[in-house]
Amino acid sequence: MENNSELNTMNRDLGCASDAAACTANSLTGQWMLMAGTPLLVNPEASSRTAIMDLMPQSPPLQQSTTITVTNALLWTATSLAIIILYYLRRLRCQSKEPYSYYLFPPSTRLPPCVVPPHPIFGHMPNVFSPPDSANYTSIFLDHADSSGISTFRFLNIPSVSVLKAEHARAVFRNSIERGGSKIIARHFKRCLGEDSLVMMEGGEGDREKWRQHRSLVKVAFTTHAVENMANKVWEVANGFTSSILRECAKNKNQDTPSQGSYCAEAADLFKWVTLDIFGKVAFNYRFGCTETLTTTPLATSLNYTVEDSNARCQAWNLLKPAYQFYCIPTQRNKDYQMHSDNVHGLLRDICRKRMEKITNEKKNGPSVHCKDDDLLSSLLKSKSKSMEIKPDDSHEDSVKMLLTLFFAGYDTSSVLLSMVMWSIAKNPKIQQECAKEAHAASNSSKSCTENNEPSLHEDASQWESRLAYCRAVIFEALRMHPPVYTNSRTLSKAVELDGYIIPAKTRVYLPLMQIQTDERNFTRAAEFLPERWVRKEASTGRWVARDHKTEPRSVENDSTYIPPANPHNIFTFSGGARNCVGHRLAVQESTIVLACLVDKLTVDVPEGLVVQKRKKFALAPPVEMPLIFRRRDWQR
């Protein structure tokens, strides 16, 4: 007992010393990066070549240059020393022969100790940034959580908490707005999306009011009615995408090979193309053309590059590489980034300017009968014109940033979701067949009009939610088991009590979404892919309808096959509370319609024996590899 007491005392002393060293290192690192990595202003109207030349730093006077060089060298030296000290202090703590157990919070909180040895410098950050199905990740979020699903760990030098129960996650979302996070990482996305981007504002006291104003502006474009009006555009793109794949299948029809009559492509590429074209159509009525050619067009390449580049610069292994962190260094990566960024901003700025001119003319002369714009951009600009005066020479940079934010929020997430949906139905042929039957009935005009007195979805896709209930359930089940964003975090605005534990205010709480949504405490038979937990088939009509978890029983006596209804509030893929995803209706609608269009005319398979492995991509978990095989569906069989 005395040895344990001495060990805990030594741990606390070392913890205080290492925390002080960490704070010094963070402070000095922040100053050094601020001096060395201040973004340069680029003329938005300049050509790509001129913009790249503008990035080159001007040569300062010799005395000033020498002063900056010496200062940077001193700061770098001090930072290195602080890191070395921190490393050896934590290494000494971790080398104890006793099992690691360290209390990160005061005894009054009753929070459990951290039992996973941390990295001497980064704490448990490498665990947090590991793929969601890896042992490193589950060790802190799942394996060592206590009976209430709570665990503690360090993110760098910040004491943090993780929860697994759905009711705990809801409590965290209710009592937090501030997102928090690393400023070193955030600077890259702020450069891409803007300081005032909705997803980049932390929601703290400094920018909370501005965040609320921006969110109110964006929410106008995502009301239930507005999203229903987008359904026909989504259906148009998804149907064209399916036709392009059918055309490729027909090209291979006469080949005497195992791939005869099929089309094979990587899931990530396919669904980035369709997601990009849907975004262009519903956001500003623009055709990128990816689904028509099943290739990436030049402009689509630029838009994709800006997102992929920001993700790459935020990877843990690139945070200490100056060429990735400082845009002023004339590397090929920085030049390419500026060129693609100029292409994207130039296009969106021109579209915003022309659309605003049209809105202004409509105010003066009345709406045009031949041209009706009902996309996201028009909603944003009209909402903006009501709240503020727009000058003729306005660059519309704020509208450009909003569009980029919407694209960034839905591009990778939708493509990852659709990839996992295809994997799930390919591994479950009966589920795929049920989706195909429902989609075929909903899109078959003669059957829909005569039997159900409803137009087909080809004629009016706005009724997709009731006509594609089973397909929608498949999307929800994929969101539950394979959330595209697998980890979320919030900084508590006030202390929260969970099962007797008191989590202090300003504590960062992590929510491992995949582990929460596959926990038996939150979903019955959580490890099984069961769309029936979301829908049931009506005996009178034979159609699938949504289930109600509030009115339907949790169990049925003497029926072991009964699947209890799922609680939709136990899914946190679209976050929760005040900062939930404003575009979640559009995301579900888009994925459901794409699924229905594909399975109506095509069968989906994956190579035999393929095992899906997920990789880490910032907060996303896309599959490393997932080739999909499409063939024309034969309804005569």
Image (spheres, grey):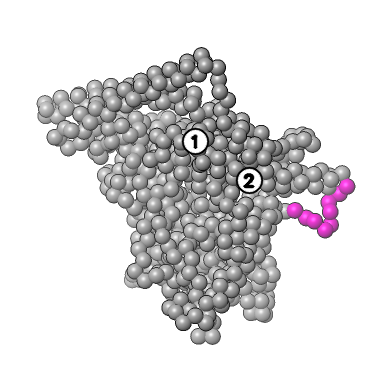
Give 636 or 581, whichever is nearer the viewer. 636
Main SS class of the magenta portion in the image: loop
Secondary structure beneath dot 2 equals: helix
Mark 1 and mark 2: Cα distance apart in space? 20 Å
Give, as a three-letter code, the residue at label 2: Val
Say what secondary structure mark 1 lies in. helix
Whether residue 372 is in magenta: the answer is yes
- The answer to whether 41 is drawn above or below residue 60 in the figure is below
State the quadrant of the N terminus.
top left
The magenta stretch spans residue 166: no
Q: Is residue 531 visible?
A: no
Above-or-below relation of 271 to 154 = below
Among the 4 quarters of the image, the one containing residue 83: top left
Viewer-proximal residue among 206 and 133: 133
The 10 Å Cα crowd at callout 2, few under 14, some 14 to 19, many 20 or more, is many
Q: Position of residue 95 (x, y in %)?
A: 18, 33
Residue type, numbered disc 1: Ala
Q: Which mark is residue 344?
A: 2
Residue in the picture at 53% in, 39% down: 334
Say whether residue 339 is left or right of residue 265. Answer: right
Q: Which residue is mark 1?
A: 186
Question: Which residue is located at x 44 percent, y 65 percent?
Answer: 627
Q: Is residue 277 left or right of residue 388?
A: left
Image location (x, y in percent) of residue 476: 48, 59
- Counting from the top left corner in percent of width and height, residue 600 is at 55, 73
Please report the bounds of the magenta region as a residue range. Answer: 365-373
State the residue at coordinates (62%, 52%).
299
In primary-sequence order, the first of circles 1 and 2 is 1
- Determine the residue located farthest toward the left in the rendered image: 2
